[in-house]
Image (cartoon, rainbow, N blue to C red):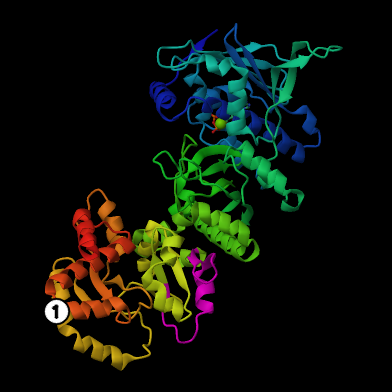
Amino acid sequence: MAKKQFKAESKRLLEMMINSIYTHKEIFLRELLSNSSDAIDKIYYKALTDDSITFDQSNYYIKIDADKQARTLTITDTGIGMTKEELETNLGTIAKSGSLAFKSENEMKDGQEIIGQFGVGFYAAFMVADVVTVISKALGSEEAYQWESKGADGYSIKTCDKNEIGTKIILNIKENTEDDSYDEYLETNRLKSIIKKYSDFIRYPIKMDVTESQLKEGSDNEYEDVIEEQTINSMVPIWRKNKNELTDEDYENFYQEKHYGYDKPLKHVHIKVDGTIRYHAILFIPEQMPYDYYSKEFEKGLELYSNGVLIMEKCSDLLPDYFSFVKGMVDSEDLSLNISREMLQQTRQLKVIAKNLEKKIKSNLQTMIKDDREGYEKFYQAFGRQLKYGVYSDFGTHKETLQDLLMFYSSKEKKLVTLDEYVSRMPEDQKYIYYATGENNDRIERLPQTEVVADKGFEILYFTDEVDEFAIKMLQAYKEKEFKSVSSGDLGIEEDDKEQSESEEKDNKELFEHMKNALAGKVKDVKISKRLKSHPVCLSTDGEISIEMEKILKSMPDSQNIQAGKILEINSNHDVFQSLKAAFDNDKTKLNLYTNLLYNQALLIEGLPIQDPTEFTNDMCKIMV
Ligand code: ADP
Ligand code: MG
């Protein structure tokens, strides 16, 4: 048997290939199965144009046999086979794709897509095998040939016996090394899962003998091992099926089978696009947040298939961060893959698909707000924060996309409302969208600052998430209505008695001056409140930084002691005000004591720490005795 040599460059190329282009050894099986599928497709195609060939789907299959003793893994197909010349050119020449040639020789129609194109996939076999033997008999040929190679050394070809048309590839699986285990490629379960993962939607059955433990006949407690030939792949991908043939349950099963999540998805979106870039996609909105969602381990992305063959498990470019909760897959026949078929050559196609998907996700969420409020609220509980981060991130670039998806708890409705709902029922004299921040709804409900706004009958949005206020600062306004904190300097509410409050302010100028000095460095100003009804004091802020923001910024690792500009507001209708006036006239020490107490009370209401709790309690005691 004459040995032929690879050309010198080919040798190097083969070594390079085997060791570097693939990230996972397991994909050798994907490559070999893709080739077998292509080979069957070619017969199918020939049958379309040649009456002497009949194509009966049931006669075409791929079979996998693992023999642990012999350490061989055999892949047999009933495809078109290879002649001696084809074995030489297609397997003896690296980067020579017989499939690519077939495609251009035969004008192939849509839906008859052949996977191969680079002419390197076959060599992936050498990642797991030290000897590869290919026995093949081509369609229309009487003879069969055996091709054999140990990799970079070269290959040999001889005639051999084979009855059926098709190809048999025998891999001598490598011995385990210190670093790598190869035994797994002889394990039925491992092989099964590799097939499921990458080749589940190969159009022809991939069969394997599986040992099952079954009840012995005539017995109800004795089991025996039975060898059974099973078809491992599902063949027809659910996304290629017609939507009307599929039930919610079918989608849910797919979600579970794919391990997209352990929950039941709230919604699925099945997309078929026939534009310049053709693709199918199934997207899911999960119900629950994955446990690792806010950890470094979480990776966003969709599964990416090229013609039913899995290319990438998590293609992150398909999803923007703010929709990172979406699960699902995209299958396209129009992707230009790179040589390892694990990456794409150009991202333009992906960008087009990603843009479309983003629009679809948004419109589906919006439909949910209208048609499945309960579902949307569930979704929002789980992922609303991510949308708010989205508004805030990238300097507000995505706010237009996201603002209609936001929801906040409302003082009026006592449930989540959208900004659109809020704005559409604003009374005419209401200028702003009011919000209050705090730890939780109960606490916000009792904030003194909300009194006047609530009294006016204006709705207040409750911000309980850290990101809320930051996101809203980024939005600034919704439908031309600006956002306004109930603690901000000017509330934009017409006063009933403007003159009276102005004269009060004037009359008590010195009192407030004195109090302000007593609180030097702590507050920017002390003044009569226009927002308090029953409470004696509160803090408001002046400037961009609110008290809630100060708290959040303080809790950050590199906080720079950023402070909100605080104003101590006194309710002039409260009895306490009379006490302050009296103390101002008669006893300045007492006034200082009162001032400190009121300031500390205001801090407590805001949930801010009191600088000196001991002093505060001592002050309390002083007024008791
Ligand atoms: P590609 O699939 O990208 O063309 P491969 O290296 O995987 O490259 O395969 C090279 C060529 O070998 C294929 O194009 C095909 O012509 C031929 N070939 C490989 N496996 C088979 C097979 N099982 N049956 C028939 N032809 C095959
Ligand atoms: Mg191939």
Query: Is residue 519 toward the left or the right of residue 296 in the image?
Result: left
Q: Position of residue 390 (x, y in %)?
A: 42, 58
What are the residue bounds of the magenta stretch?
406-434
Task: Identify the residue at horizontal 45%, vertical 76% (top origin).
Answer: 454
Q: Nearer the viewer, residue 417 or 517?
A: 517
Q: Is residue 416 highlighted in magenta?
A: yes
Q: Nearer the viewer, residue 224 or 133?
A: 224
- Name the spot of residue 266 as percent of width and height, x first: 62, 51
Indicate the position of residue 162 as horizontal and vertical percent values: 71, 14
Q: Quadrant of residue 464?
A: bottom left
Question: Is 321 a magenta residue?
Answer: no
- Seen at 73% across and 36% down, the residue is 44
Foreground residue among 215 and 333? 215
User: Which quarter of the image is occupied by the N terminus?
Assistant: top right
- The amino acid at mark 1 is Asn
The number of numbered discs placed on residues in the rendered structure image is: 1
Q: Confirm if mark 1 falls within 8 A of ligand 1.
A: no
- In this rendering, is residue 404 above or below 199? below
Pointer 1: what residue? Answer: 586
Looking at the image, residue 572 lies above or below residue 310: below
Q: Which image quarter: residue 607? A: bottom left
Q: Residue at x 54, y 24 (%)?
A: 91
- Residue 24 place in picture, x, y as percent: 47, 28
Q: Which corner quadrant of the image does residue 159 belong to? A: top right
Q: Is residue 133 visible?
A: no
CA neighbours of label 1 inside 10 A, class few (<14), some (14 to 19), many (20+): few
